[in-house]
Image (spheres, rainbow, N blue to C red):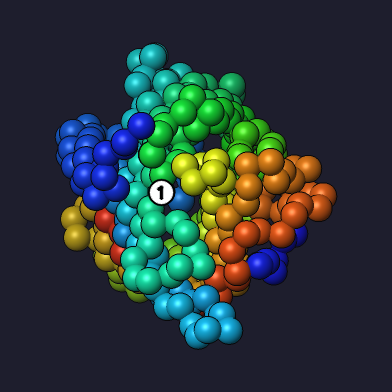
């Protein structure tokens, strides 16, 4: 596992950022009018999720500290299109949008803003009364969107099996493959959805995510969650790429503002915050989830210190058994 950090005229970044933001909000509003349906074996289903994350950051240099902030806006959607009257077979259509920018003065960290568009297309079927099989295609286009190239598009796919062992617990196994700018990434996850009792529920896909939720009241939950991200983005500057590899454990509190809508606030501390810039030919042997295999040259930029991260999110959910 990699834990330590190492050291033509395009449209203006501001106009591109504004255009992406307008497109993202427009798409979200359109999708909010579509009512998602319950999928198989999850703590809850999010048809739409909009989140904003704020990260104070620092680089220590001999000339003094460079303090700046990262701001990450994400919009995610997942809509089922049922193929049978009993809803045992359906297509999954959705996607993810991301606008990630770094404000402040940070001359030793050249990244100003990067973006991601990732459509999702999948197929899900109930093989039996207790076993569901889902396959997803997840191409991504990640870069600073300056001088966009076909090589910015990377393809990925995952297969997920879900087994409902009882009314209170469902197990999942997930296998996947993604191309990143550093090379191949293999996804191997073990998931669960366990209703421990009327107050506690534990669910997630380890090691990518894990949530332990406690119901304070019918409308308020609190608890612990873990989120891991490993993403790469091509940079126009000398065809370098930026890698964001983070492990965020944190505490959250959320409230249902209606039967389907929930707002969540999270405070986390990044155990791992690798924000690293590499030359395009600096490749890893492979990654398994967020653990790196092989040796790669040190990144170009100095270390970005770990620290706090604050997130606010709004989601449209369906909770099993909740009307």
Q: Residue at x 18, y 38 (%)?
A: 26
Q: Position of residue 182 (x, y in %)?
A: 66, 43
Q: Is residue 304 above or below residue 125?
A: below
Residue 61 in which image quadrant: bottom right
Q: Residue furthest right?
A: 294
Q: Residue at x 45, y 34 (%)?
A: 141
Q: Position of residue 250 (x, y in %)?
A: 49, 72
Q: Residue furthest top?
A: 84
- Of 179 and 134, nearer the camera is 179
Q: Quadrant of the N terminus?
A: bottom right
- Of 188 and 150, nearer the camera is 150
Q: Position of residue 28 (x, y in %)?
A: 23, 40
Q: Residue furthest front?
A: 8
- Of 53 and 104, nearer the camera is 104
- Of 201 and 211, nearer the camera is 211
Q: Which residue is mark 1?
A: 114
Q: Is residue 279 left or right of residue 89?
A: right
Q: Is residue 215 above or below residue 240?
A: below
Q: Residue at x 42, y 78 (%)?
A: 67
Q: Residue at x 39, y 14 (%)?
A: 84
Asked if one can make out residue 147 in the rendered structure from this viewpoint, the answer is yes
Q: Is residue 320 left or right of residue 271?
A: left
SS of the residue at dot 1? strand
Residue 246 in which image quadrant: bottom right
């Amino acid at each position: 596992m990699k834990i330590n950090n190492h050291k033509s005229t395009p449209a203006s970044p501001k106009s591109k950022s504004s255009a992406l933001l307008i497109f993202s909000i427009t798409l979200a509003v359109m999708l909010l009018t579509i009512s998602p349906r319950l999928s198989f074996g999850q703590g809850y289903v999010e048809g739409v999720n909009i989140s904003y994350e704020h990260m104070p950051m620092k680089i220590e240099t001999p000339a003094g500290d460079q303090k700046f902030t990262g701001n990450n806006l994400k919009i995610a959607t997942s809509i089922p299109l049922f193929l049978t009257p009993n809803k045992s077979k359906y297509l999954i259509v959705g996607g993810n949008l991301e606008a990630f920018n770094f404000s402040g003065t940070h001359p030793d960290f050249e990244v100003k803003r990067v973006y991601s568009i990732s459509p999702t297309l999948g197929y899900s079927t109930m093989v039996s009364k207790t076993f569901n099989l889902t396959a997803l295609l997840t191409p991504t286009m990640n870069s600073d969107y300056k001088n966009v190239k076909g090589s910015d598009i990377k393809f990925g796919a995952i297969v997920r099996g879900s087994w409902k062992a009882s009314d209170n617990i469902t197990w999942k196994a997930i296998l996947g493959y993604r191309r990143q700018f550093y090379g191949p990434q293999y996804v191997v996850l073990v998931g669960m959805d366990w209703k421990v009792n009327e107050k506690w529920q534990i669910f997630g896909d380890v090691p990518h995510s894990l949530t332990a939720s406690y119901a304070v009241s019918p409308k308020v939950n609190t608890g612990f969650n873990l989120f891991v991200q490993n993403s790469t983005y091509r940079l126009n500057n000398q065809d370098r790429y930026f890698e964001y590899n983070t492990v965020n454990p944190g505490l959250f509190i959320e409230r249902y503002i209606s039967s389907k809508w929930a707002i969540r606030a999270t405070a986390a501390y990044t155990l791992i915050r690798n924000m690293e810039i590499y030359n395009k030919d600096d490749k890893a042997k492979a990654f398994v989830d967020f653990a790196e295999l092989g040796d790669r040259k040190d990144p170009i930029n100095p270390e970005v210190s770990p620290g706090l991260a604050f997130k606010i999110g709004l989601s449209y959910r369906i909770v099993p058994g909740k009307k």
